[in-house]
Amino acid sequence: MTRQIENAVTRAQEALERTRSASPAEVEQWLEAAAAALEAHAEELVLLAAEETHLPEGRLRGELTRTVFQLRLLGAETASGRHLDATVDHADDAWPMGPRPDLRRVNVPLGVVGVFGASNFPFAFSVMGGDSASALAAGCPVVHKVHEAHERLGMRTADVITKALEAASAPEGLFTAVTGRESGTALVNHPAVAAIGFTGSARVGRLLFDQACARPEPIPFFGELGSTNPAFVTERAWASRREEILRGYAGSVTLGMGQFCTNPGLLFVPALDQEARKVLSAELSEAPRFPMLTDRLAADFGETLDAVAGGEGVETVLTGEPGRSPGPTILTTTAEHVHRKPGLLGEELFGPAGLVVEYGTEDRLGSLAALVGGQLTATIHSETDEDPGPLVRLLEARAGRVLMNGWPTGVTVSHAQQHGGPYPATTAPGTTSVGTAAVRRFLRPVAYQSFPDAQLPPALQEDNPWRIPRRTDGGAS
């Protein structure tokens, strides 16, 4: 166990004693303090992020705005008390299955949460991104492992956040940042860590997931590991608006140099004829280019792309220049080949590249969709008077978010958002890492039976001092 992790987790444990009894209003104040601090230091942080990640300044400003909004939305959710799911069943001697004792249930913080920052989102999925923000909203102290792709930015952001929390009278140790690969392993193994939030590669995520499960006391591992995000185009949609679809696909597959977990890496169309190839090539030639986040990411992208492109049955439609700032690449294959080699559909091209599958006739779409593994998203392009119901049913069993006539690279932060999916997209398909429901990952229910009112948590006391919504005797209070 590294000294850095031991110190951070010890302080977080001490902070947990106070967060367990913090009111929803107090927690909201802590999140607001963090949001305001990020706004106040926006210029400094964006410039540092641009220098360290090579991402465009406009993209970084938008991402910081999203991060601040997310903190405030989660703060408002916390203040409402809805996440506590407080439920009161009064004693009832006439209960049909026999006398019922007084039972009251409420969600409580899981405990200290370890969070791994993502390489591709230096703000929104990093130091004070979705995992950290939702864990804090649940009342859980956070120990954050900063990603080495933007370590200076991460540590500076953490310094801004810790000072803001201190000024807001949050408990010391509520949020701590650590660095180094050894610290990541030690964080997952520390016996006082109650859960892990992770966004990253399938290889690293699976190693840490297995580690979390192999502990003497296994802990929840909320990991986002990768997705190829298939998009299916019906024959009629392809015939009526092929160019529009190709323009949208080109913009989505190259957005942010393809370094999005929702990058639509698979496109299923009837056929990619010469005219369609010309349209796609023309659109992709206009795509912005800049260095990928790290040399390692660029190298991994190049290696995976070469392996897929060099495989039997795969043709290169558009070849992009290799290197740290690679040009867009489009590959194509057929439905017949995919049925012979279904593993091809699971190869994530984390960069500006995509694989177009020519399916021929629409009666093959169902069997192709059935070959797709767990996904964050799946998309259908069809005409308004078509009924793609059978395809929808197949895809909703495989993806956390199903889109109609759109593209998946925009992930808004809202109450209804679902950013998760069956493995290998995530390790916890019943949860989301974006939106207000993300808070519930870091809570667990506790029921109190026959307690004196004064000894109950405030959320369950009879006069409801926090004034939160509760379900009482099967109805609402």
Image (cartoon, rainbow, N blue to C red):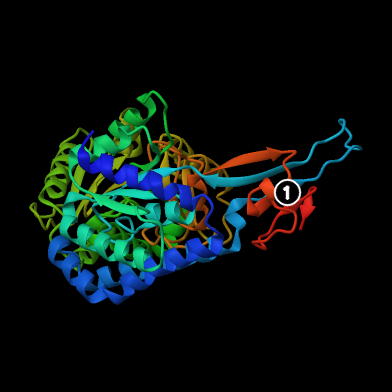
Q: Position of residue 276 (x, y in %)?
A: 29, 59
Query: Left or right: where does residue 347 sit relative to residue 366?
Result: left
Label 1: how many residues lie within 10 Å, few (<14), some (14-19) or many (20+)?
few
- Tell me if residue 208 comes above or below residue 477 in the rendering: above
Q: Which of the 4 image quarters holds residue 164? A: bottom left
- Tell me if residue 352 comes above or below residue 79 in the rendering: above
Q: Which of the 4 image quarters holds residue 34? A: bottom left
| Viewer-closest of 177 and 326 | 177
- Tell me if residue 30 comes above or below residue 459 in the rendering: below
* Residue denoted by label 1: 453
- Mark 1 falls on what kind of element? helix
Q: Is residue 9 visible?
A: yes
Q: Residue at x 21, y 58 (%)?
A: 155
| Viewer-closest of 56 and 288 | 56
Q: Position of residue 174 (x, y in %)?
A: 38, 54
Query: Left or right: where does residue 196 sit relative to residue 459?
Result: left
Please name the amino acid that badge 1 sits on. Answer: Asp
